[in-house]
Every structure is written in C-alpha cells, then in structure tokens.
Image (cartoon, rainbow, N blue to C red):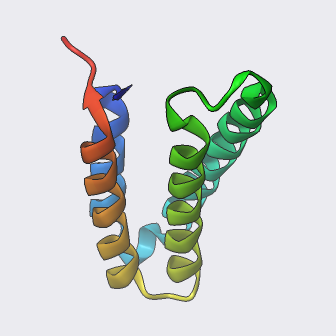
Amino acid sequence: MFMISKEAMNSLISLRDKMADSRKKSECVVALENMIRAKESHLARAEWSSCCGNICNLVPQLDTELRMLQNILEVLRKGDSNKAAFLLDDYIAFLQKSYSLEPD
C-alpha cells in the first residue's frame, strides 16, 4: 500500500470546499492543473523505470489518478462545480482506499 501525507489529504478536502464558492473557481483550476502536472511527472518517472518491472502496480495507480484529476478539471472548466466536487469526493475516496496516511 502507498502512503500519503495528512497535508496532501487535507489540501484535497480544502479544495473540495473551495469548489462550492464560484469566486474561487480559478484558484481551483490552478490547483488541479498543478496536481495534474505532478501526477504526469510521477507517471513519466514510473514508466521510465518500468524496464525493471511494474513495482507495486505504480503505473496503473498513477494513470487512474491522473485520469480522475483530468476529468475533475474538465467538468470544473465547463462550470459544473457541484459535479466537480462530487468527482473530487470520488477521488478522495479512491486515495483513502489506495493509500494509508503517514504516521504522526
């Protein structure tokens, strides 16, 4: 199982809360774009090292996360912040299932 920091999880929850405020749409778009760039970078590194085998199914995990984030961003850009928040809830649930929180 992978690990995720509490800060990363809290930032996702904060992002979900911001989606309810239409004045913060551009801030949410930027945050999602940054997350997507980071996931793309992680995925490229994982694929590059795949010559050694797909360690812990990292590539499919990152690919799934990337597609989920891209979908959230697309929906948010179309102006449906409620659906984007719902999809972000799904993403958070996916992470909670796939990752454990770092210990204190």
Q: Residue 102, how many percent across, how many down? A: 27, 19
Q: Residue 100, how many percent across, how many down? A: 26, 30
Q: Is residue 16 left or right of residue 53?
A: left
Q: Residue at x 49, y 29 (%)?
A: 56
Q: Is residue 27 left or right of residue 104?
A: right
Q: Residue at x 61, y 42 (%)?
A: 59
> Which residue is at the front of the view, 2 or 19?
2
Q: Is residue 20 visible?
A: no
> Which residue is at the front of the view, 36 or 77?
36
| Number of marks | 0
Q: Residue 27, how many percent across, how many down? A: 52, 59
> Which residue is at the front of the view, 96 or 53?
53
Q: Residue 49, how many percent across, how many down? A: 76, 25
> Which residue is at the front of the view, 22 or 34?
34
Residue 51, above or below 71: above
Q: Residue at x 63, y 32 (%)?
A: 54
In the rendered image, which quarter is residue 47 located in? top right
Q: Quadrant of the C terminus?
A: top left
Name, please, the residue furthest toward the top. 104
In the rendered image, which quarter is residue 87 located in? bottom left
Name, please, the residue furthest toward the front. 53
Q: Residue at x 43, y 73 (%)?
A: 23
Name, please, the residue furthest toward the left. 104
Q: Quadrant of the N terminus?
A: top left
Q: Is residue 102 visible?
A: yes
Q: Is residue 25 left or right of residue 37?
A: left
